[in-house]
Image (cartoon, rainbow, N blue to C red):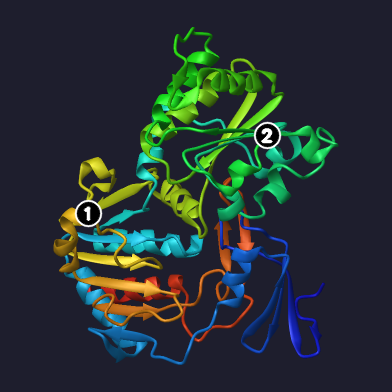
Amino acid sequence: MDPSRTVDDRRIWPDSVCTACGCLCDDIVVKVKGDRILEAQGACSIGEGHFLGNRRGDGPEAWIHGEPANFDEAVERAAILLAGASCPLVIGLQECTTEGHRAAVELAESIGGGLEVPGVSATILSLQSVGEVTCTLGEIQNRADFVLIWRADPVRTHPRLFSRHVLEPRSDFLPGGRNDRFLAVVDIRETTTLKEADLAIPMDEGAEVEALWLLRALVKGIAIEAEQIAGVALKDWQALVERFRAARYGAILYDGRSNGLSVRGIHSLVRELNERTRFVVMPLHSGGNGVGARNVLTWRTGLPGAVRFVEGQGPLSSDAGLPSATAADAVLVVSGNPMVMDNEPTTEVRRKIPRVLLTGNQEPHPQAAEVVIRTAAFGIETSGTVYRMDGVPLPLRAVVASRFPTVEAVLRSIEHRVRERRA
């Protein structure tokens, strides 16, 4: 279908990418009339909310101290705050294309600040010590005859994962589709995914690490003398291990927000299973482009989670001087929650730090930061490159025009003003 073709004054965009979850389904047919999206064929319930919920009024393009301002005034004020800070910090980056990520890295370097991708530090540290055996979703779709979902509920969070990639697709290796696959689910609560499992194991809350180390012991053939571990009968854990051994190609999928020790246990288990058969592992990331942010930071600096730029020394790791949220004296939040760094012990301190917020939300709060600049809505009004949760890059195109600039354009404008002021 030609994207420029119109039918009854409606514009049709086939093969559109949905950024509502980490699956980044790229087979959505979006129908647009004027500046409104009428339909998103093929999208799940989360995807429909993502496309059809894009409604924004005619409010101002920026605010300074809660008062309406134009774009140039907001950029100037943001440049003053960031250039005048001794420890500025750039954070957020989830709802942004890789082109925007490049601009964020360059801005952080120009102001001599830090840049951090939220939620990846613990995972990265675990992978650096254990390693990762992974693949693409296409490989799981074609070859995985055994799938273990560990502490995740993809039926709710990634509604099309099973139908497109994990359970239902037929292939030359699995001509029977779902009938040729075995699904095991381990969780601490009754989830929708747990109800669909061929083998469901509800374990005790807080026993995740204990269970993972038990599975590693059983895989190694170590005898365990106990009737029950982590609230689950030992025979059930042994049944799961037998399924491990019977698999020709196994895949373990887990919540991408898991803590570092759990991630280390999962990846260690997969490494040990590969001594007997083929196993892969993949975190289930949420929507946006957090994987892209990590990739850009890695190839630009060699540091995947956090980096601090120091004049004359180049990029340094977080252990070598990344400002903490309380040490930073100015914060730029790129397409994220302005309170993303807050937690109970230091919330009041952090609220006093000057903040610049770039947001594509429908109705941003003018008081959310000292400077608020509205940007084009990610995944709907922006074009560029995004990364699926398995690391595959996909082209993203705007299906609706926006009167607001992209994140990349705003960041480059701020960097330009910073350089002009210093010159």
User: In the rendered image of this protein, does residue 150 appear above or below residue 265?
Assistant: below
User: x, y (%) of residue 354?
Assistant: 19, 71
* Mark in front: 2 vs 1: 2
Quote the CA–CA distance across marks 2 and 1: 57 Å
Q: In this view, does 95 lie above or below 36?
A: above
Mark closer to the chain start, 2 or 1? 2
**Callout 2 touching callout 1 (CB < 8 Å):** no
Quarter residue 78 falls in: bottom left
Image location (x, y in percent) of residue 182: 70, 32
Residue 420 visible at all? no
Instruction: Please state which amino acid type lies under the numbered disc 1.
Output: Glu
Residue at image location 16% in from the left, 70% down from the top:
84
Percent x, y of residue 320: 22, 42
Residue to which mark 2 is pinned: 198
| Dot 1 crowding, Cα within 10 Å, few <14, some 14–19, many 20+ | few
Q: Which dot marks residue 78?
A: none
Residue 20, by quadrant, is: bottom right
Q: Quadrant of the C terminus?
A: bottom left
The disc placed on residue 311 is: 1
- Other residues around mark 2 within 10 Å, as few (<14) / some (14–19) / many (≥20): few
Q: Which residue is at a point 33% across and 60% down the rendered structure image?
A: 91
Quarter of the image with the N terminus is bottom right
Q: Is residue 54 above or below residue 68?
A: above
Horizontal and vertical percent for residue 235?
Answer: 56, 18
- Residue 145 visible: yes
Along the line of sight, the residue nearer the viewer: 82 or 47: 47
SS category of the residue bearing label 2: loop
Tell me which residue sits at (49%, 51%) in the image. Answer: 291
Tell me the kind of residue under disc 2.
Asp
- 234 sits to left or right of 35: left
Element under label 1?
loop
